[in-house]
Image (cartoon, helix red, strand yellow):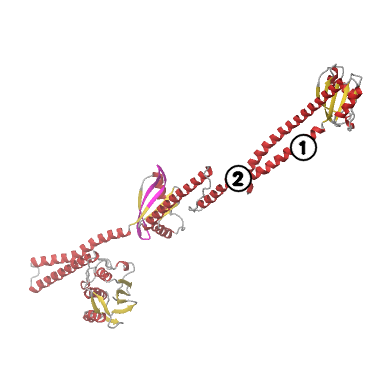
Amino acid sequence: MFWKSVVFKLWLTIIMLVAFVLLILTVLLLEFFENFYVEDAEMNLLNQAESVQSLVESHEDEGVSIDTVNQLMDQSTRVTIFFDEHQYWQNDTYEEYLEIEPTWFITQSDISRALSHGEQIKEISTLPNANEDIIIVGVPTHDERGAIYVYQSLNVVEETTEQTTNIILLAASIAIVLTTIFAFFLSTRITAPLIKMRKAASELARGEFHTKVPVLTYDEIGELANSFNLMRRQLNYHITALNQEKSQLSSILKSMADGVITVNRKLDVLIINPPAEQFLEQIVYENSLQKDELPEELKEYFTQVLANEVEHSTEIVVQGRSYVLVMTPLYDDSVVVGVVAIIRDMTDERQLDKLRKDFLANVSHELRTPISMMQGYSEAIVDDVAETKEEKQELAQIIYDESLRMGRLVNELLDLARMEAGHIQLNIEEVNFQDFIERVARKFTNISTEQNIEFDVHVSIENQLVNIDPDRIEQVLTNLIDNAFRHTDVGGFVKVNVSKQNEDLVVEVQDNGSGISEEDLPFVFERFYKSDKARTRNQSKKGTGLGLSIAKHIVEAHDGNIYAKSKYNEGTSFTFTLPRK
């Protein structure tokens, strides 16, 4: 609104100030001029009275002097001459209302003093026969027996005063108009830079830091514009620095593997990164909570940290994964304003720790049996328990077989350790894959016949050349096919299918044997993992539990992939892919 603007307020202030000054000046001038004109009229009448006095007293002939007075006096002025209290004379005038009975002069105490006391008078009085003010002066004669009264209407003075008043009011009006123009000009000159600064400030509030206020003057407003531009540059610098720091902090939080949650004293989430969001989503899903609701368990931990102002750590298991929470008070100076929680996924560490323990247990278990057998049979030989040569040969053969088994276990452990350390070496050759598969399959022909298990190899590609390490891939195929035969009962089948998918070769080893349970299937490629927990397989079906783990490392070294599908008591299918390089 215009009346709320600085221009209007500044203009109104100037106009009111000028109007007040002009009002005081007008009142004083009118009072001055009114008094001036009254005094001037009184002085003029007094001069006329003295002239009449001199004229009357200088002529002994009264008729001559009276005629002279009539000629000298203005028609608006009336003269009454008292030679004594009983003799008087009045001149003629066109203003009949100025005719006053001589007795009036004698009856008015203030006016009769010129006649009775010989004093000079100057009075403003009202006519007895009309509601009209007059200015009257009285001069006593030299013999003090008479007096000369000269008077005229106050309208003459009022007309002059009115003209003067009109001139003063006209001048005041012109002054008001000029002041209005000047006030608007001055206001706009003063407020124009302020308006530009207001617009620039609005743009600053919207985040636009490139607007510059022009400096048009070098006064206080110019200094204000310079200060505003300096503030704009400083704000732009600091906001840019803050945005960079915020971006860096956001990038750091997003790139962190650990989750970070920051809450205030009201337990409102202030900062959270993607790993922490995934952690909360898992808790929300597991406990059927609202999406944006903080779990009560975490609220209790945060409240405990806020109350005790000490670091607290705990471990939570969510959706089968282990998380360690380290919660630390967030300080502002010396006041705790919130809590910072670091969420670390310890599932892999816990799994590695478990694998380490299982590894030691499995190695001990696998070595204990052959060592016990070798120790027992060797003692039998030393103690001559075996009396015949055939019995001693049988015991020696068992000791030899167990030593071979221990050698295979140690060699496989060494191979697996080298593979996991990244030291696997591949001797890549160009191989006809169809001939390669058929050559490997021929090694199991006798086994399928002996165990009465149908063995079928189907290759849907012809003369396909691939770059592989044939010894390592043969080790993979041998392990998979041997596992299939060992877990397939009499009358079952083992099939090997080779096909092409996109740019990869796909090799599938399928059987209808005992299968793998659903809970064991994710762990079949781990070291020493056996679905037969009691390890009560037949002696002919012993295994080290390292074959599938070795096979996985070999396939991945060829940039391939291996996976298993199985249903318990229905069969198992192992599939691996090889890129055709």
Q: Let me know if residue 29 appears in the view.
A: yes
Queried whether the magenta region covers residue 331, the answer comes back as: yes
Which residue is at a point 77% across and 36% down the rendered structure image? 162
Coordinates of residue 129 in the picture (x, y in percent): 89, 29
Task: Specify which label sits upstream in the sequence, 1 or 2.
Answer: 1
Residue 317 % position (x, y): 36, 57
Q: Which residues are magenta?
A: 315-341
Residue 214 lies, in percent from the top left, at 52, 50
At numbered mark 2, what does the secondary structure look like: helix, strand or loop? helix
Q: Position of residue 99 (x, y in %)?
A: 89, 29
Residue that badge 2 annotates: 187
Q: Amino acid at mark 1?
A: Gln
What numbered label is drawn on residue 163? 1
Q: Amino acid at mark 2?
A: Ser
Q: 361 or 565, which is in the foreground?
A: 565
Q: Is residue 226 left or right of residue 548?
A: right
Give whichever of 430, 140 is nearer the camera: 140
